[in-house]
Amino acid sequence: MTAAAPELPGPPPPLPGLDPGWSRLVSVPDPDGGKRTWHVLDNGVRDADVTLLCVHGNPTWSYLWRRLLAAAPPGWRVVAPDQLGMGFSERPAGPRTLPQRVADLGALTAALGVTGPVVTVGHDWGGAISLGWALAHRPHLAGVVLANTAVAQPAGDRGPALIRLAHARAVRAGVTVGTPVFVRGATALSWPPLPREVRRAFAAPYRTAARRRAVGDFVADIPFAPGHRSRPALEAIAAGVRGLDVPALLLWGPRDPVFGERYLVDLLDRLPEAAVHRYEGASHLLPEDAPQYADAVVRWVGDLGTPRPTAPVPRGGPARRPWTALVERAGDDAPAVVEVGGGTVSWAALADRVGALAAGLAAAGVRPGQRIALLVEPSADLTATVYAAWRAGAVVVVADKGLGLAGMRRALRGAHVDWVVGGAPGLTAARLLGLPGRRIAAGRLGAGARRALGAAQDLTGLEALGRAAPAPPEPPADAECAVVFTSGATGPAKGVVYTHRAVAAQLELVRTTYGLGPGDRLVAAFAPFAILGPGLGIGSAVPDVDVTAPGTLTAPLLADAVAAVGGTVVFASPAALRRVLATAGELSAAQRAALGRVRLLMSAGAPVPAPLLRALRAVLPAADLRTPYGMTEALPVTDVSLDEVEAAGAGEGVCVGRPLPGVEVAVSPLTGSGAAAGPLTDRPGGTGEVCVRAAHVKERYDALWATERAASRDPGWHRTGDVGHLDGAGRLWIEGRLQHVVTTAAGPLTPVGAEQRVEALAAVAAAACVGVGPPGGQAVVVVVVPAAGAPRGERLRLAPTALADAVRAAARVDVAAVLVAGRLPVDVRHQSKVDRAEVARRAARLLAGSRTSGRARRR
Amino acid sequence: MRVLVTGASGMLGRATARALLERGDEVTVLQRRPAGLPCAEVLGDVADPAAVGRAVAGRDAVVHLAAKVDVTGRWAEYARPNVEGTRVVVEACRAAGVGRLVHVSSPSVAHAGAALVGAGAGPADPDRARGHYARSKALAERAALAADSAGLAVLAVRPHLVWGPGDRQLVERIVTRARAGRLPRIGSGAALVDTTWVDNAADALVAAVDACGPVHGEALVVSNGEPRPIAEILTRLCGAAGVRGPRGRVPFRAAWLAGAAVEVVWAVTGRRDTPPLTRFLAEQLATAHWFDQRRTREALGWAPRVPLDAGFARLAAWYAASA
């Protein structure tokens, strides 16, 4: 492996992922006279439709871009040089400064005959150099792509700590040149850890101190000090970027210890129109940590040439705003929000408070479009703050505690919030999470505590301030108003961006679908709906429970909330309803009577089994039991009653009813390998990814350009990630999640149908159908929770033969293994969606058998 | 077609010869002892060039099954029939101008002991194959595929864990142990394992005779494509034979170490009987080995006719009839 180091300049040795055909040596006239030999990866396409000019940073080399070369469609040229002194290029005698490197790159592209259109792609300090080239070649430039880079130190910042450390002369000599610590360290930062052969490939051109000299020089050339010789060049680039009027794509690894979040904020400040994609979990070496970046770049560059058709998106009612009902009932003394065990706020008081608070927020400096994180428990305070923020044109950011501290940290830091509103726990959490933004205290907090938590104002103070301030201008209907994070049940939580228009359309749809009128009162035990009462124009009560922990709701608590507000409508998750059912025996006669007055029960968040709804009839005898289907990105999409579910009978999947008025549903059919690649169709019977078009569908995902692009493959439509089919009667049946489709050699298999057939067995309480093995050749595994004699816990084991036989017969697909467990793992948020991915991981581990020891393997 | 089947006294060889006969092929068989099949027969050692030359002469295709299959014995006992025998068959095919050679191999030639989960047919690797049998078969398969050329199309077919009525390798050993109360579960018993009902394997070999030519120079694993947990397979095999299934449980590490000890004892003492456990067996019983059948089915234009459950039922009927 450590054969004699190859001659430099010269082509690299064979390395994983690198096509030797891409390597070429180019002799380029040096601006100082003489010639320099560059090593360049170049797919050599002539008369290219577009050229990607990829510039690596320090201490990597063009190997970083191999996936982009591999992913380039026909007709695209990809040029990735090793900078002089780096990689397998020539080692010039002296250090190269930033302006020299920009000029070097220009000389190289001239020698290579690179003309327009060009998209530059830069990583690390290659970002600044690529932008230097971009500014100098503006007529050829079609776009810029940047990954974990910087062009300026944000105000008050002294530069990345790790690089600053390497800057100290003695450290630099030892770390960057004298030893391979820096070279090795760069790839050691990667997350998930890189395979050893890839780490070796990155170190290949830097085996000796002489070959690492430029690595040290490069670090020394980073202009931290004001008098640094490369400083003017960097400042010119940083200023020039503000004037760049080409599209920009920013790809970011948030775990980067070198270029942290503030560098992304700085770049966005300079390139406000840039598309952004944050790869959760990725670190500094983004092209390695998020290999899928290559597809995103190809997609994005491809879109540059062909503008996407603007979508014929249905628009909601023109006049209404989320706060319109508040204005309409401003003179009404009926209760609007009731805190069970707390106070009551009338419509008049709430409207008055929202108006004052909106003006106060504006007076305190909240600007339209700024983001406000709400770390406030469901309460009258929260409700008032949400509507006031909307009225002031701000964007509320909602991430519930169900995500866990790490999930909230990822979500809220990634959302770049400008303000944080919270009580003592919320503001403490904000500090723990390291959230940016100014703080506003909610609730009763002493001046000392407020100061300690960094809050200059509190809601009461802002309200008072607002009474003497002018009402802020109404934000436009298409302005963004909310970023709501998905549950994270199916991957890292995604920020979903809503506009005022979409929220208003959603409220309107819910109001008309369920015939909500002034006489109705809502009890919502489901986080996002707890604040929607005022928007719907109906009074609401918040049960005295932690809504993020649905397992804590009991029948008496629900009954008390219903009684407190005279509730007629209940909204709850299936998990919460299960607890209600389990504790129904604790109800007093008065509580039973209160529940008897509920006319409508809505349950959402996960599929609701018909038996659960049937059992709930005893607790809520007068209620129409309805299950809206939808997701954070579009809720509701369809709606179904228990009677309709029973009329539909058994089928492949869960019947979720017909699309609501104004909502279109279609599917994108699955291919044999389980990809939802087909054109949208509403033809009955075909299984595919469920797609939705409606006025209340999300605007976009936040800072997830590639995810958004994939989700809106068909402009105007949202791909839900659920798989299902429409039947001849126009009903939608959900068959599972796209990522849970089992891809067997016989074709794709959706899990829900088989699960339902197995769950129909008396011996089975619950079932999960998953695949193990390589995609396209998977074996089907069914994990069941036996109705009786279940083992304890989530550990999987083999099912007894008789049970296995029964399950196989019921499933009607070839089942390789039947396993049992005491319970199935579920998602954190709803505690009712079975985490099939986790089930599959565990099943795969068990069914692979014992791990043979290293000794056994060597024989 | 005129086809030579070597090793027709074994369960799979016999079934293959029968299947070829049934469809009207002109079949010759070669093995040391009479196979009792209604066809031409050459008796002889597969490593004997003269006998093989006689058998191969005038054939259109050869299905080469003859091999020593066992878990004990010295290397030389495997090398001669398995490695040398294959070389002799290949040479005889070349000399006689036979166009097609279907070399029957084993998935163990590419199995280094780690779990195989929906695996393809990896390259035969004699250096890492486990035990004399697998190593000799790996060398044999390499030699056979190396002979693939314009004049001689070679296809290696690797049936995985073939079982059926009268099987002395797999079924009988398991049933005998279970009857003696010496069949424990090793590890969790959950390792997914592919097996092949004998008639399906025979069909695949017949299909390989036809496909050999357009398809050549590659190895294809053949199985029922219905992986099951190993404990379930053992239980059902025992059930078919009317004996109680696995009793007790041995942790994998303990079984592996016991297997290692047994191998040493057998090697040192030169015992010839079948040992209770070897490392290879411990691994086979405790790690997953199932295969992606898509390439095989596409290449051979074949699919198993007898599902696993039907196989268990037929085995039970056979045991009932022979009791």
Image (cartoon, rainbow, N blue to C red):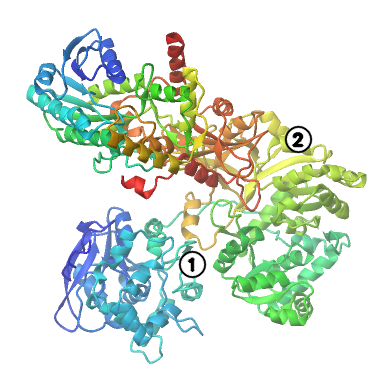
CA gap between label 1 and label 2 equals: 47 Å
Residue at numbered disc 1: A254
Mark 1 secondary-structure assignment: loop
* Chain letter, disc 1 residue: A
Q: Residue furthest left?
A: B95
Q: Residue furthest bottom?
A: A227
Residue A831, how many percent across, how many down?
66, 49
* Chain letter, disc 2 residue: A
* Residue at horizontal 42 percent and vertical 41 percent from the top: A775
In the displayed structure, A194 sits above or below B55; it is below
Asked if residue A335 lies left or right of residue A831, the reply is: right
Quarter of the picture containing the C terminus of chain A is top left
The answer to which quarter of the image holds residue A133 is bottom left
Mark 2 secondary-structure assignment: helix
Pick the residue in front: A841 or A59.
A841
Residue A576, how many percent across, how many down?
73, 48
Residue at numbered disc 2: A614
Q: Which kind of residue does numbered mark 2 sit on?
A: Arg
Is residue B145 shown to the viewer in this render?
Answer: yes
Q: Which kind of residue does numbered mark 1 sit on?
A: Pro
Asked if residue B5 lies left or right of residue B51, the reply is: right
Query: For the residue carrying disc 1, how many other residues have a C-alpha within 10 Å: few (<14), some (14-19), or many (20+)?
Result: many
C-beta proximity under 8 Å, tags 1 and 2: no
Q: Residue furthest right?
A: A590
Query: For the residue carrying disc 2, how many other residues have a C-alpha within 10 Å: few (<14), some (14-19), or many (20+)?
Result: few
- Label 1 or label 2, whichever comes before in sequence order: 1
Is residue A46 shown to the viewer in this render?
Answer: no
Residue A838 is labelled as none
Pick the residue in front: A184 or A594.
A184
